[in-house]
Image (cartoon, helix red, strand yellow):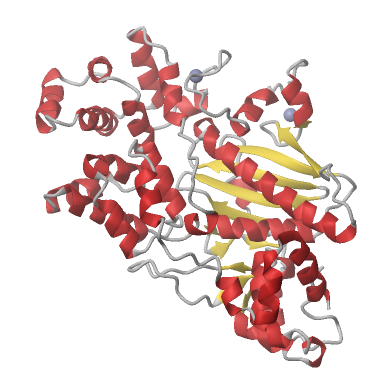
Amino acid sequence: MLHFGPKKIKQGKPFKKMSENGMIQKVDLYQIWEQEEFRQILPFKEYIFDMLIHLDIVSEQRRYDTKTGSRLPIENFFVPCMLTQRNDTDFLTQECTPERTLSLAFVFKGTIIPPALPNRLICACLSMWTLKQYRGRKLMFSGFVGLSVDKEHDIVVCVEGNKILLYLVHKRSKGLIVPEIATSVRECLHLTLERISEFYQSTVHEKVISQLPFHTEYSCSRFICYFPEERLALKTDECVCNHGDDITLNWKVWNQKQKQKQCDPDCTGLSEDALSQIPSNTELLRLSVNCDKLMIHDLAIHLEMEETEWNDMVENYPRNTQMVKFLTLIDLRENNGIRFGDLAKGLREMKITTHTLCMMRRRKQVISSIQDDILDSIPTDEILDNISTQIGKMVFQLGIELGLSIADLENIDKCNCDLTAQSKDVLFRWRGDRLVKPTIRVLEQALVNSRKGARCLEEVVKNVDLQTLRAVETATGKWMKLYVSGSHLKKIVYSSIQL
Ligand SMILES: [Zn+2]
Ligand SMILES: [Zn+2]
């Protein structure tokens, strides 16, 4: 465990601030290190600080210039391990409701989890997703963090006894959770926990123990019963809990098979709750991509669109079938107030499988060749300029995927006659948004979803200056040599932090 200050050390103001809001400024930490007890560290203060970031003990609260995309000097850093304030908000009871939330638990052997573990996990989460604000407060407390994954999905990671609980919350209904998002969040946290556990084991034992100190359990809709994954994966016995929930269904959302184009044979379609919801732009876009023009036409007529309206739509976009299909669905939502249930009814009347609707929950998996540090960065002006020349007529779809409103997109369409200018406008508007961190990873996913593909982005960022060597740059020569070997170095740095 890292101690910023044993009792005999003066703690002062920065220390107090740190335990209240879990944040510290670099200068404050340096000030703490100026005390006699830390004299050995001080010459290497910048390097040690970068190591604290590397080891997920301190996390950057990254700030970017939304105009240029360049990194602003970081003033505040998260230090979850210093937080003492417990979660006293009602976020869990008000937002993580059974109707909108799925949950799983990483269960550790023994009765409690060493606190350093969840703290480092929270730190790693903070570097991946955006810290959520709830009723004007940051959702970061001792052993508790709330984050936005995208505009529809939030997560909560919190510690309870020997469990680290993960809640995935959808804005409207858990029946609309995108399984690929659930799966990637689970995999990401699992991998991070694995990495942190290995690190701790390697500092205690000479040999790395192959068995993980935790396993995963999936919960029922009341978050009371948890079933271990081995039991769910076996599929031999019934996994129905005392409340009558089949936990296999939840498990499937968290464990989406890749490249699966069609529903499982036992898919029951959208849940009642999901059917009662109003579809979002992205959901309608995905649905329109998966249906041909004739099918959308017939569906629209079934849902009481006039033939003349359809003809107008076709005339408005004579060379863009995709736009006709998508805007027809939007029109049905705006003017006829359709919900998922109406779409399902229309499809049934047309004798078409309602599993067509399941497709709008699917998302293509991105296998990225871009390295994580770059993916987590906000694209610069130059990147956006270069990519905008390559979007072409997919600009509208890309805009929807990036979460721009239809009004915004129509406005962009009106103001710019050429597609490059439109793309540029779309990309810069997206980057100005502050709700979800506009990273290259988000852009990459949107490019794949809109069927443009990510190759163009890979090309554009290929020659981008990597900031990954930042830690090395600020290190002194003596320490730089050590940077070469990974796990060995961790041990050295870890023991130096313990000094
Ligand atoms: Zn139950
Ligand atoms: Zn289905």
Residue 483 occupies which quadrant of the picture?
A: bottom right
Relative placement, left or right, of 170 versus 91 is left
- Residue 362 or residue 89, whichever sits in front: 362
The residue lying at 75 percent from left, 20 percent from top is 234
Q: Quadrant of the C terminus?
A: bottom right
- Residue 8 or residue 54, whichever sits in front: 54
- Residue 154 or residue 465, whichever sits in front: 465
The residue lying at 39 percent from left, 43 percent from top is 454
Relative placement, left or right, of 375 versus 478 is left
- Residue 350 at x, y = what percent? 32, 9
- Residue 214 at x, y = what percent? 80, 43
Q: How many marks?
A: 0
Q: Quadrant of the N terminus?
A: bottom right
- Residue 252 or residue 12, whichever sits in front: 252
Residue extending farthest top: 351
Report whether residue 418 is seen. Answer: yes
Task: In the rendered view, tell whether residue 417 sits above or below residue 310.
Answer: below
Task: In the rendered view, tell whether residue 160 sits above or below residue 337.
Answer: below
Ligand 1 resides in the quarter of the picture at top right
Report whether residue 89 is seen. Answer: no
The residue lying at 39 percent from left, 18 percent from top is 344
- Residue 231 at x, y = what percent? 78, 25
Relative placement, left or right, of 281 versus 16 is left
- Residue 272 at x, y = what percent? 51, 23
The residue lying at 41 percent from left, 12 percent from top is 353
Task: In the rendered view, tell whether residue 372 sits above or below residue 354.
Answer: below
